[in-house]
Amino acid sequence: VFRLQDLSNSVHEGLAALLANSGIKKAGVGINCDIKELQRTHHFKNFKPGGFVELGEAANPNGKQLISLRALAAIYMGVRISKTLSVSNWAHPEISNRHILYAATDAWVCREVVLKIPFSVCHLSL
């Protein structure tokens, strides 16, 4: 877990290349909003996203509503995850251990859901 504003220009360039690489799948829920927020920043204004999978849609291809990560964790893993830190101050200069655990859990759950949903769905990209 790292703060984008604390990174050097060369790291921003490498990260933008990674995020644009359609050969590397990146999965999440509400990922379109994350991409738009990222593109509002100075270093990522011109990056074109590639290889992103919206799990909230992929897991519910016939539905019109996104399925939350919390719901996906319950459906595919039989666990309940807390989302209380999702609305906390992520811009604070120091990231707390609770924030790190939250982000790690979020990433782990996304990976586990990708491994459990039908393979063809994981090839859907934004």
Image (cartoon, rainbow, N blue to C red):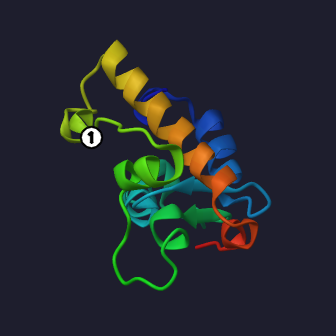
Label count reads 1
Q: Which one is in front, 94 or 84?
A: 84
Q: Is residue 88 left or right of residue 36?
A: left
Specify the farthest residue to the right: 23
In percent of width and height, residue 117 lies at: 63, 61
Q: Is residue 26 left or right of residue 41?
A: right
Q: Which residue is mark 1?
A: 86
Q: Which one is in front, 23 or 66?
A: 66
Which residue corresponds to the image point at 74% horizontal and 64% vertical from the top-left? 22
Name the quadrant containing residue 20. bottom right
Q: Which one is in front, 116 or 13?
A: 116
Specify the farthest residue to the front: 78
Residue 95 can be seen in this image: no
Which residue corresponds to the image point at 44% horizontal and 58% vertical from the top-left? 29
Q: Is residue 122 left or right of residue 96?
A: right
Q: Quadrant of the C terminus?
A: bottom right
Q: Which one is in front, 5 or 84?
A: 84
Amino acid on which the number 1 mark rests in the picture: Ser
Name the quadrant containing residue 5. top left
Which residue corresponds to the image point at 35% horizontal and 58% vertical from the top-left? 68
Secondary structure under tag 1 reads helix
In percent of width and height, residue 47 lies at: 58, 62
Where 102 sits versus 39, above or below? above
In percent of width and height, residue 35 lies at: 46, 60
Where 84 sits versus 34, above or below? above
**Neighbourhood count class around disc 1 (C-alpha, 10 Å): few under 14, some 14–19, many 20 upward:** few
Where 16 sits versus 106, above or below? below
Which residue corresponds to the image point at 36% horizontal and 84% vertical from the top-left? 64
Residue 32 can be seen in this image: yes
